Amino acid sequence: MKIQFKCFPGGRRKAVTFSFDDGREQDRRLVETFNRYALKGTFHLNAGMLGKAGYIAPEEAAELYAGHEISAHSVNHPFLGLSPTDQLAGEIWEDRKALERLAGYPVRGMSYPFGSYDDRVVAALPAFGIEYARTAAGDGGFELPADFLRWRPTCHHKEMAERTRALLEHRDRFGRMALLYIWGHSYEFDDDDNWSLIDTVGDLLEGRDDVWRATSADIVAYMQALDRLRFAADGGIVHNPSALEVWIEADGQAVAVGPGEAKRL
Ligand SMILES: [Zn+2]
């Protein structure tokens, strides 16, 4: 029995996710465009900025971002890497609490304001219940992170069309999962007058059922479920103790393992 590959849902090897920061009013147009193309995004919000001029209002957040993910970005958008340790709890914990009241679900992810962090910040995050944190340093690659608290995106949204084309053509010679992780700010589409980039990407992904659309939290939950699979010593049985269906490849076949299922391979 040769069990070599992990897969995204449906046995897919590719996924795409969008991650946008700051909760500015241009998010309304961005979400509407995402919904038109059935794309999924994560929106990182600062509880201390919501309702101010140019930002979305707290009372519209739940409905606006329905079907997407609300995630943290600190209360006041400081450089966390330059902030006193004493300030970290307030910035992250209080952001979570305020956003969870709006969202109606646990908020366990964040992106670093200004992409700023250091080892001290990363070490503190688990105590604040944070499971993933996105940096702002894309390297163009499609690899899933070794450390979700230093999760590097693929690219800024300016490069989204070019990297989407690259993902669609991508063939990993080891069959590894490939994630296109695009980050940015919705107001930059106004500043740069390039909203058409999203239409280009939406059109490129149209009908591409081999690419999973997911939020950051969806991806983290799925990868955690994959990591929790238990295999028999001879590889002939797999047990999925999680509540999510997960997919693997065994002897060249994509196999679904249901929640709680023990399956012979
Ligand atoms: Zn920001």
Image: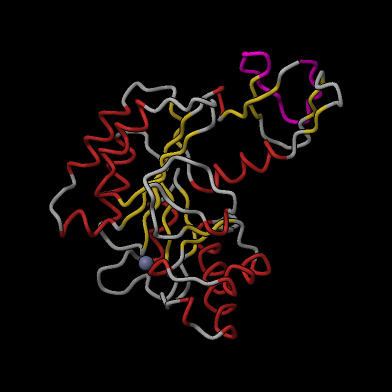
Q: Position of residue 163 (x, y in %)?
A: 31, 38
Question: Which quadrant holds the C terminus?
Answer: top right
Instruction: Indicate whether 79 appears above or below 153.
Output: below
User: Magenta residues?
Assistant: 250-265
Instruction: Indicate whether 17 appears above or below 252.
Output: below
Q: Which of 166 and 213 is in front in this view?
A: 166
Task: Tell me if 181 is positioned left or right of 89 in this view.
Answer: left
Q: Position of residue 20 (x, y in %)?
A: 36, 55
Taking the image as four quarters, which one is ligand 1 found in? Answer: bottom left
Can you tell which quarter of the image residue 55 is in? bottom left
In the image, farthest residue toward the left? 193
Can you tell which quarter of the image residue 60 is in? bottom left
Q: How many labels does the image show?
A: 0
Taking the magenta stretch, the answer to whether it contains residue 168 is no
Q: Nearer the viewer, residue 41 or 210?
A: 210
Taking the magenta stretch, the answer to whether it contains residue 263 is yes
Q: Which of 99 and 194 is in front in this view?
A: 194
Instruction: Indicate whether 230 appears above or below 94.
Output: above
Q: Where is residue 111 in the image (x, y as percent from the top left)?
A: 46, 61
Q: Where is residue 237 in the image (x, y as percent from the top left)?
A: 82, 21
Q: For the point 47% across and 57% down, which residue is it? A: 134
In the image, farthest residue toward the front? 173
